Image (spheres, rainbow, N blue to C red):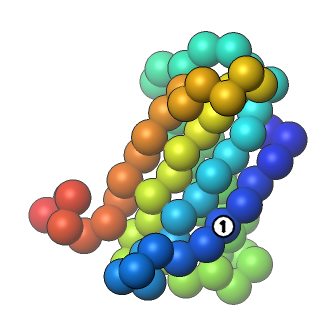
Amino acid sequence: MYGLTHTKNREGVLALTVWTRKRSGYGGGIDTFDKTLASLLTREGVSLAQGYVLNVYGPDGTRLHHFDTTVENNS
């Protein structure tokens, strides 16, 4: 990971964008990456109570992964 931005969407849900030097998807590794990222954000005081949307992009701008933990998508 070499870049991370965050914002909130219209509903106030955290939207994370990550840039990586990887050229292909994370496969099963996205769960580990997601847990590590969520732990880091929580330690920094970021509330994940409403869930979040994570998009990971490769070095050429290709979206490698989309991960949505919002309540409406996980109930």
Residue that protrudes farthest toward the left in the picture? 75
Q: In the picture provided, is 68 more to the left or to the right than 3?
A: left
Point 45% across, 58% down: residue: 53
Point 13% across, 64% down: residue: 75
| Residue 59 seen in the current view | yes
Looking at the image, residue 37 lies above or below residue 25: below
Residue that protrudes farthest toward the right in the picture? 2
Q: What's the residue type where badge 1 is placed? A: His
What secondary structure is found at the residue carrying circle 1? strand
Looking at the image, residue 34 lies above or below residue 63: below
| Residue 49 seen in the current view | no
Task: State how many labels appear.
Answer: 1
- Residue 61 percent location from the top left of the image: 67, 29
Residue that mark 1 sits on:
6
Point 68% across, 46% down: residue: 18
Residue that protrudes farthest toward the top in the picture? 24
- Residue 45 percent location from the top left of the image: 69, 85
User: On the rendered image, what quadrant is the N terminus found in?
Assistant: top right
Q: In the picture provided, is 2 more to the left or to the right than 31?
A: right
Q: In the picture provided, is 19 more to the left or to the right than 34?
A: right
Looking at the image, residue 60 lies above or below residue 30: above
Point 36% across, 82% down: residue: 11
* 73 vs 45, nearest the viewer: 73
- Residue 24 percent location from the top left of the image: 61, 14
- Residue 4 percent location from the top left of the image: 75, 54
Residue 32 falls in which quadrant of the image?
Answer: top right
**Mark 1, residues whose alpha carbon is within 10 Å: few (<14), some, or many (≥20)?**
few
Q: In the picture provided, is 43 more to the left or to the right than 34?
A: right
Residue 62 falls in which quadrant of the image?
Answer: top right
